[in-house]
Amino acid sequence: MLFLKSTLGLLPFLCCYASALVVPEQHGKLLPTRTTQPFLHPGMLHTEQDFTRMRSKVSANASPWITSWNILTANSHAASTYSPRPAPTIYRGSDGVHSQNYPQLYNDVAAAYALALRWKISGDTAYADTAVKVFNAWAYNLTLITGSTDADLAAGIYGYEFANAAEIMRSYSGWSAADQTQFKTMMQNVFYSINHDFLIRHNDAKIDHYWANWDLCNIASMLAIGILTDNSTMYQEAITYFKSGGGNGNIDKFIWTEYTVDSQVLGQGQEAGRDQGHATLDFALAGALAQMAYNQGDDLFAYESNKLLAGSEYCAKYNAGSDVPYTTYTNSDVTQTIISNSSRGTIRPEWELLYAHYADLKGLNATYTGKMRDIINAASGGAEGGGGNYGSTSGGYDQLGYGTLTFRLK
């Protein structure tokens, strides 16, 4: 039996939410934090307890963690000989003048994360030293991300990923305090400034114009940079937008219709009628956002009766090959009367995180999330890989990956 509940029409007043935000200064020196409690470090996607588990599993040669570790160590981005390619300006999207060079950024971000993981788990400082070279190269060079409006995607996706890599490395004695400050300042001035402006203005478009993934990546970046810089105002800005923002990154607009099917709640995602490549990206981003917040004591996974789980199960169920209910989606630009089968079964290393939290940690029904996890792992050599294991184009770098190593609990 199927029951339907819609939340899309409940929050019309939120379109003016962003203009009321009080936010940190966007340029210049790092601002003093306004904390009610200290941030946990490391405390984004991974905590020290997580790294202890990873080391134990790798040391014991335990499967499937060791499979993911071997995929990581075989990836050229994780080599101690890796050389960064910084640029003062990154272009994503055509501005009619400059060539797009954003692959330089996403490759170096993937390398920084892979190298940081390799150091943190193995203890070999050769990988830490190379990671520091990547951070410093960009910290002292990058001043602008531009191009078309796609620059907002670059600032969001690569912003949260770069901040996560740096969070792992913050305890490394070989990364000086001055260099860490320079990196944090660059992240605030270059990435956060775009994240904040996008969520406030949406490039002066109608509030429902941009798809959910645009909001979600910028929320994730804002949250991550808030943690990195110990700025609770920035962090809270991200949490508040996810819960009540005007755009499609608001969870009630991102997962806007719920159904009960065979006693399980399923949540239709905002991009389900667009294509499955973007529909799955939404949950890669939302999962990362929820994981970072959870490690700081804010349980977005449980928010609104595990609404993110309902969305994950809907998306995973359809992409794993099963039918799901669908309600026509309409916004200022489109009317989508059927669920899209374009890119159905998209391979993204994202499902380990969601399944580990909901099924293994909390004991909830995440059947289809688990099925997608297993499908992706089978297609990836037995475990999730990372940037560089899923092609050379940007889609293969939209998530950090290696989730079998980093998130798997059982």
Image (spheres, rainbow, N blue to C red):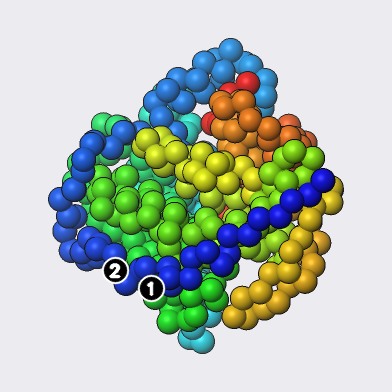
Question: Who's the residue at 67% across and 78% down the image?
Answer: 334
> Which of the 4 image quadrants contains residue 270?
bottom right
> Which of the 4 image quadrants contains residue 331?
bottom right
In the figure, 190 relative to 148: above or below? above
Q: Secondary structure at mark 1?
A: helix
Residue 40's x, y, as percent? 31, 33
The residue carrying mark 1 is 16
- Do the numbered discs 2 and 1 sit on residues whose CB atoms are within 8 Å? yes
Residue 410's x, y, as percent? 63, 21
Q: Is residue 28 visible?
A: yes
Mark 2, other Cα within 10 Å: few <14 / some 14–19 / many ≥20: few
Question: Who's the residue at 36% across and 37% down the image?
Answer: 296
Q: Is residue 183 visible?
A: no
Determine whether, in the image, residue 223 is placed left or right of residue 283: left
In the figure, 86 relative to 109: above or below? below
Of residues 114 and 299, the one drawn nearer to the viewer in this rendering: 299
Determine whether, in the image, residue 182 is placed left or right of residue 308: left
The residue carrying mark 2 is 20
Q: Secondary structure at mark 2?
A: helix
Q: Residue at the bottom extreme?
A: 96
Residue 219's x, y, as percent? 43, 57
Mark 2 to mark 1 CA distance (whole Å): 8 Å
